[in-house]
Image (cartoon, coloured by chain):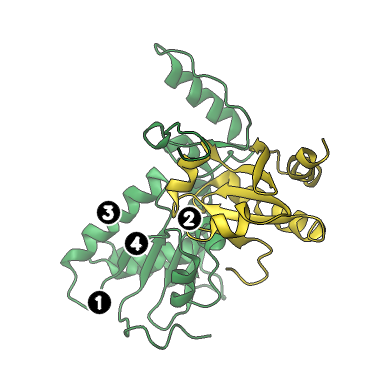
Chain colours: A yellow, B green
Amino acid sequence: MEPDDMLQTVDSVSFDRLVLEDSGRMAVEFMSYGCGYCRTIEPIVQRVASMIAAEETVLRVNIAADPELAKRYEITGTPTFVMFLNGSEVGRTEGPAPTQSAVIDAITRPFMS
Amino acid sequence: MSADPDAPERVVPILLYDGGCAVCRSIGQWVGAAALVVPPGQGIVAQPVGDDPAALRRLNPTLGIWDAYAVVHVIMPDSSMKTGGEAVAEVLRRLPATRWLAGCFSFSVLGVRPFQMILNLAYNILDDIRPLLGCDSCGRSRPWVQPFARLAAWLRSLGKQMPTAQPALHFRPLPATTQVRVPPNGL
């Protein structure tokens, strides 16, 4: 984990425990460090994760390190945000625009309905 | 600032390049091949940045993985870092074939290094136009490059089936070989 990193990285070992067995709101960013779009959006995701930390947890899956998780959730590109509530997927967004409003909308809207 | 004290002592610098970028990969492989003829302890090691932030921090505690992907780095044996054009000059200095050229980058007039400034500019231009040259990991082109990127995409599409639109500009589709459709529950 990078210093000042608001996103905990989860892998195939910890994913079930931290995401599927948790009862809270979770947004999981499937990303890759070598992805330019992920790099562009990273500071915004960090800021948003800090803003919504009280209501929702934002986690990260590095698909280069954990391709099996990417296959399991049918990830076709990065960044893809998959939202979970009580361990079940409730929505997903692929490649939101790198703006604070777009990222907030992407990772909170599935919980509004 | 110091590297991992448990790590074996390193005597040559490490060139870190973006392994997802075809341009960087080609250059990195060329450097690696050119360094093979250098006597042990005098050359340079070229390796992709990879995807392990902790491994990078063992090279230099201040080196973040996002920074490593943003610009080329050379990690010196004492863990200090050179980036961008300075890193390129260090690589050229370490290779027998280019050592003669690297000397000019140290040339200074009144504290200004004109050749190093030219190299820095050349590096920045190459960095910007990488998407035109086959970079798969650079993201969206900088604004001044975008017209050329569209022209290059149009030229590539001539005689081929028109490319399908991406779902979003800020989205990088995975290579087709890695796309396996299985149910989300893994069954």
Per the image, the residue denoted by label 1 is B42
Q: Say whether residue A58 is visible.
A: yes
User: Are the residues flagged by discs 3 and 1 from a single subunit?
Assistant: yes
User: Secondary structure under badge 3?
Assistant: helix
Per the image, the residue denoted by label 3 is B30
Count residues near mark 1 (Cα–Cα under 10 Å), then give few for <14, some for 14-19, many for 20+. few
Q: Chain of mark 4?
A: B
What separation in Å lies between label 3 and label 1 (alpha carbons)?
A: 17 Å
User: Secondary structure under badge 1?
Assistant: loop
Comparing labels 4 and 3, the label whose residue is closer to the camera: 4
Out of A18 and A2, give the one closest to the viewer: A18
Image location of residue B170, percent across then percent down: 62, 37
Comparing labels 4 and 1, the label whose residue is closer to the camera: 4
Horizontal side of B108 relative to A52 (left or right) equals left
Badge 4 or badge 1: first in the primary sequence: 1
Per the image, the residue denoted by label 2 is A12
User: Are the residues flagged by discs 4 and 3 from a single subunit?
Assistant: yes
Per the image, the residue denoted by label 4 is B47
Q: Quadrant of residue B48?
A: bottom left
User: Secondary structure under badge 2?
Assistant: loop
